[in-house]
Amino acid sequence: MPQVLLTKRIEFAAAHRYHNPAWDAARNRAVFGACNNDPGHGHNYMLEVTVAGEVDDQTGMVVNLYDLKRILKEVLEEFDHKHLNLDTPYFKQTIPTSENIARVLWGILARQPAIGRLEKVRLFEDEDLSADITAAGQGASLTRRYHFSSAHRLYAEGLSGADQQRLFGRCGHPDGHGHNYVLAVTVGGKIDPDTGMVTDIPALDRVVQELVVQRFDQRNLNQDQDLARSIPTGENLAQCIWNLLVKAVPTGRLERVGLGETRETSYEYIG
């Protein structure tokens, strides 16, 4: 039978600290940086819960939204306005990273039959960092967002002016135009038991800054050494970024590259 996915978002606030008690202070500081600062720091988390199922003929719903919201609020009472390391039983020996918090919430919600079949839990630590646990996955995935601005002109050699206008419209203007791009890099893999992370985020940040942001920010894409051989569309730019990152991700595996060109237009590349 056809399935429908329903996603509900709900906020909560909590504090946490990244600390591995098996390591000395120097190693904790080296691996976790400021996230290791005692007593910790807080976030306004956004939780997205996706459930799947058939549409009930009588209610027209996959699950009653009132019941779903009530259960989510009840579950989050254990986490909201708490220090996750100190006030909950889940993180006494486990580091409360975004990946581990999402995994714990998945385990709790999966035991709630009233909400239907759990499909995905996505936890935003902030608007540029989120972790996903899915029904199909064996680990977790982490998405990190970055920002850069570039100009381009869409132009194809050998086409008449009329064909250029038909294909590219104003994007083919000889002076070009610019975008504030939003780049979403998703890395998947097993959650490391020592760090609680799928990938080394500071190392990932350095790789993306060096290979992507420094290369494209405040530049004309038509003059880029790779994009100059093609038309610098969002599709080609997303594929180019994938090729730059796929072998450079520090740990985990590159799952997808998302590229927001405008608020209405975005692209994804999965190699």
Image (cartoon, helix red, strand yellow):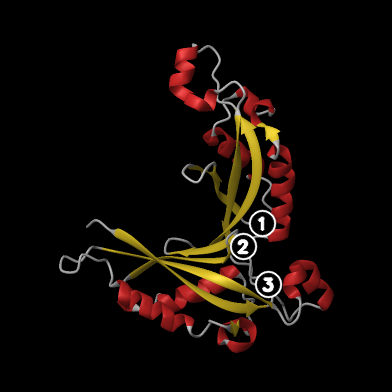
**Amino acid identity at mark 3:** Asp
Q: Is residue 105 above or below residue 210?
A: below
Across and down, in percent, residue 212 comes to 68, 42
**Amino acid identity at mark 2:** Val
Q: Residues within 10 Å of mark 1 (few under 14, many from 20)?
A: some
Across and down, in percent, residue 173 comes to 56, 23
* Residue at (28% x, 73% y) in the render: 64
Q: Is residue 87 above or below residue 257?
A: below
Across and down, in percent, residue 10 comes to 45, 71
**Amino acid identity at mark 1:** Thr
Q: Is residue 245 above or below residue 7?
A: above
Residue 198 disc label? 2
Position of the N terminus by quadrant: bottom left
Q: Residues within 10 Å of mark 2 (few under 14, many from 20)?
A: many
Cβ–Cβ under 8 Å for marks 3 and 2: no
Q: Residues within 10 Å of mark 3 (few under 14, many from 20)?
A: few
Image quarter of residue 91: bottom right
N-terminal-most mark, 1 or 3:
3
Is label 3 in a helix, a strand or a loop?
loop
* Camera-side residue of 191 and 167: 167
Cβ–Cβ under 8 Å for marks 1 and 2: yes
**What residue is disc 1 on?**
251
* Residue at (54% x, 31% y) in the render: 233
Is label 1 in a helix, a strand or a loop?
loop
* Camera-side residue of 165 and 31: 165
Q: Residue furthest right?
A: 26
* Camera-side residue of 195 and 204: 204
N-terminal-most mark, 1 or 2:
2
**What residue is disc 3 on?**
194
